Image (cartoon, rainbow, N blue to C red):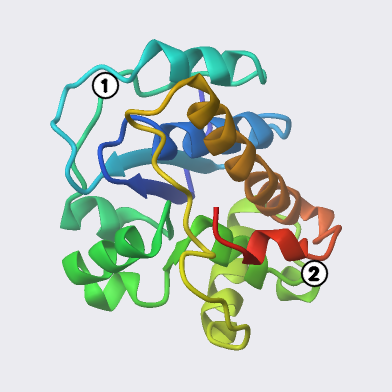
Amino acid sequence: MSEPFRASVLMVCTGNLYRSPVAAGLLRQRLAGLRRAGIRVTSAGTAAVPGTPVPAAVAAALQSRGGDLAEPVTRRLTAELVERADLVLGASIEHREAAVRLAPVRALSRAFTLLEFARLLREEDAEGIADPAARLTALAGAAAARRGSVRVTGAADDVADPAGTDPSGLRACVARIEEPVRRIAHAVLSGGVDCEWPSHHSQTG
């Protein structure tokens, strides 16, 4: 019998075709190393056409990194999905704002961009907490309290949409997502925050 989920992360992009499935798949893969983590990771899109198959290239990119595509078709972001999430991570600022508009009371302190949340993590935020699900909620709360303490410019917290680009666009997208996901997973799995956020992540790209 599987363990129940005690916390949930919702990844959000526009079409739920590239960025959010990649981010969700990579985070699931990172968290899979710890039994009974109790954290559910899903994805949705602000303008997704429900039931559209996620591109095979995305599944292949995840498989090459030991992950998998748990959600083979897209789904639309709804207020209910936001309400059920303990942490909402958008591919860009527009996705974070969309989540807040759908469920302002719930999402205001729980919605970030992926890069923003990774940048705001600090080792002491979940000090003394061993349970991964409890660590996740503690990290989210502390990050929300710290929001605004570090200024970024332009689209520094955005992950560019690879839709319509050549295969190098998807590779660049995956590469931009991997480091913040690694950092978040390390913090959730009782490992603290093992590195300073690299300066190049505060640039557009």
Against 146, residue 53 (above or below) is above
Q: Residue at x 41, y 34 (%)?
A: 162
- Which of the 4 image quarters holds residue 75? top left
The total of numbered circles placed on residues is 2
**Pointer 2 or 1: first along the chain:** 1
Q: Could you say where residue 141 lies in the image, as x and y percent from the top left?
A: 54, 75
Q: Is residue 195 left or right of residue 77?
A: right
Helix, strand or loop for disc 1: loop
Q: Is residue 173 left or right of residue 89?
A: right
The amino acid beneath tag 2 is: Glu
Q: Residue at x 16, y 22 (%)?
A: 51
Residue bearing mark 2: 123
Please name whichever residue, 59 or 186, is drawn nearer the observer in this view of the structure.
Answer: 59
Against 117, residue 142 (above or below) is below
Q: Could you say where residue 112 lies in the image, as x and y percent from the top left?
A: 45, 66
Q: Residue at x 56, y 21 (%)?
A: 62
Whether residue 38 is visible to the viewer of this picture, yes or no, is: yes
Residue bearing mark 1: 73
Packing grade of label 1 (10 A; few <14, some 14-19, many >=20) is some
Packing grade of label 2 (10 A; few <14, some 14-19, many >=20) is some
Q: Residue at x 62, y 29 (%)?
A: 29
Whether residue 37 is visible to the viewer of this picture, yes or no, is: no
